[in-house]
Amino acid sequence: MNKLKLVGLGAILCCGLALSQTDAGAATISKNELQGNQMSTKVVNFKNRSLSANILEAIQKNRAGADFTSFHYYGIAGLSPTANYVNKDGYVTTKTTSIHINQTNDTYYELIDVNSGTILSTGRVVGQQIYFDTITLYTNGDYRILGNYNEIAQFDVYEAAENKIPVIKAEDKTIRLGDSFKPLEGVTATDEEDGNLTSSVEVESNNVNTDKAGVYSVTYTVTDSDGGIGTKTIKVTVLSKNTPPTIHAEDRTIYVGDTFDPREGVTIWDAEDGIIPIEKLFISLNEVDTTKIGTYKVIYMVLDSGGTLGMKQISVTVIEREVELPAPELNTVLNTDTTVEGKATKNTTLYLTIAGDKYQETVGDNGTFSLTLDQTYAAGSAIEAYVKDDAGHTSAVYTGTVQKNTFEKPVLDKLTDKDTLFTGSGRANTTLVFKIGNDKYESAINENGLFKATLDQTYPVDTAIEAYILDPATNEKSEISYAKVVAAEEISINRVTSIDKLITGTTFANATIEVKVFGYRDRIYEGASDENGKFNINFTRFYPAGTSMTVKVINPVTGHEFSKTVQVYPRKPSITAILSGDTKVEGLADPLGEIFVTVNNKVTQGIADSAGNYLVRVNEAIPQAASVSVYQVVKGIKSEPTEVIVEQ
């Protein structure tokens, strides 16, 4: 910061003395003298003007931008000076290019730098103000404003803060087919220096089609007064027209005395929302009286997420229970089963005869039963079954036979060229016999019908697999299942640093590769792996540490896609040659990277400049044979270290 000189006005203000008329011949500087090299040694005269009660103007808020705001100055009252790029503390900065003051009684105005003897700008009268335009200021200058060659103001200059990129605020949107879409509606932009830039937001791209359902994108940009560009991309989802939800409910017939649950068996489907939970169903009318014979109405209502109403009316008929009960329904009984299951009238007793053996089981409240047999029965064995209720009513008789169990072939899970565990399913309590290539294996299938077989080794892609099931109790064999060893869906990506313009790794041979770089308008690079699975995809630029990249691979055999996301690491810092006795370590790293220098286990920190150059001074001279290690941290990401031994 330029300190106030104790000459002319400065001396008077600092000492708190009243101003008086001085000898004009001794203190007034001619225009020619102001332009000479002796300017800084002259004392500039103050004519008899009233001083402001407070020589510092009031400080406004939001000063960091290009708008003209007031700033601190020393001088006569009433000038009300303003400038562009005033900092938040109310001082002119090195970015300031124009200053305005109120016009006084003077007729000629100049902005000068006393230190360099330079007239920076001649005042231009605009209405009641004086404009000093196209000026360049430095923190080491001594800047004065003269009126008719007499000093009327002095101000200090501070280094300008680094320009911040403007921020666009815009949210993803969901609309319906045919809706009006205004891309700038609700979009705002702010800048730390310029303030509100909403009116400057532009739509860079917009592919939204409100006549076709789909997901679209809109990209916005805004540029601040320093040329900093902020971008934002949102997703716009266009949904089809909202249709009413459909309530699936059927007319029902129940018996007198039955319990009636109006929600039982009811489902709700909506074209936009999918399945709607039954809890959202509203029963607007339920006339059902299960104590009386009759036909009753039940009306259902439901709203979808778009507020559209769906309705459904059903009839519920309550009848007297028939004296003859319906025959029970048995699930197919196989020659390998030891359980018979099925449905029958609830709260009755099931009587079952199979191959002459008799069984009895209770039918539950839900109308189902499960009966355990003493043994398995041969295919073709006769089955008869009926139920009785507590009143002694007997149902019609079910008749059938035991069926032969078809021996299904095993189901084989995928086996990759990286697997040593082979899994799948088949008939419970049997043995899986299988061959991979020329190697034969056996594995037990447990009581849950699952198997896990440990292999001696991995097998190459396309190795043939054959497998069948052997039932040790009957020596029956299933049909053979065939498969092949497939490639494991893997991808290996080598580290990418801030000085790399490519990404490399390995995956399937001849696979399609797509690399998406996030934060840079989602840049996408494409390529392919070679016959050995290696890939090498070049970028058009370097990407800074912390940048995320997703590598997507498409399996050329199955067409299946899978991906892996990595981030860019800071580069390994370089180290300029070090000689014994040096007290500094320097080199090249990422711009503004945090530098950590270790000399013989003693750590010293530093910061690289905006170009990536760093210089870290150590407390002691570096001895010969010392071990020196340097790494950097950028955005919390640590680079690999660079290590050297001091040889001279």
Image (tube, rainbow, N blue to C red):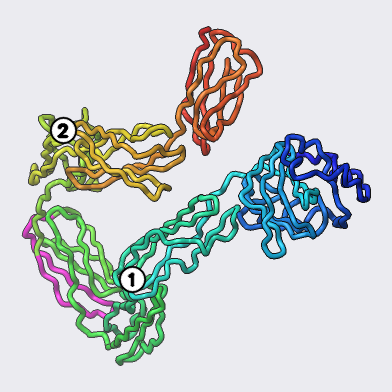
**Where does residue 437 sit, x and y in percent of width and height?**
11, 32
Image quadrant where residue 362 sits: bottom left
Give the spatial CA distance, label 2 vs label 1: 60 Å
- The residue carrying pointer 1 sits among few (fewer than 14), some (14 to 19) or many (20 or more) residues within 10 Å by Cα, namely many
Q: Quadrant of the N terminus?
A: top right
**Where does residue 277 sit, x and y in percent of width and height?**
38, 70
Image quadrant where residue 525 sits: top left
Mark 2 vs mark 1: which is more N-terminal?
1
Tell which of 78 and 586 is nearer to you.
78
- The furthest residue to the left: 380
Q: Is residue 202 visible?
A: yes
Disc 1 is placed on an element classified as loop
According to the picture, the residue beneath numbered tag 1 turns out to be: 210
Chain part drawn in magenta: 377-400
Q: Is residue 69 visible?
A: no
According to the picture, the residue beneath numbered tag 2 turns out to be: 441
Q: Residue at x 23, y 42 (%)?
A: 512
Q: Is 392 inside the magenta-drawn segment?
A: yes
Disc 2 is placed on an element classified as strand
**Where does residue 428 sit, x and y in percent of width and height?**
20, 47
- Check the image and report above or below for 256 versus 453: below
Q: Are marks 2 and 1 in contact (CB under 8 Å)?
A: no
**Which amino acid type corresponds to the residue marked 2 in the rendered image?**
Tyr
- Check the image and report above or below for 565 versus 318: above
**Which amino acid type corresponds to the residue marked 1 in the rendered image?**
Thr
303 displayed left or right of 397: right
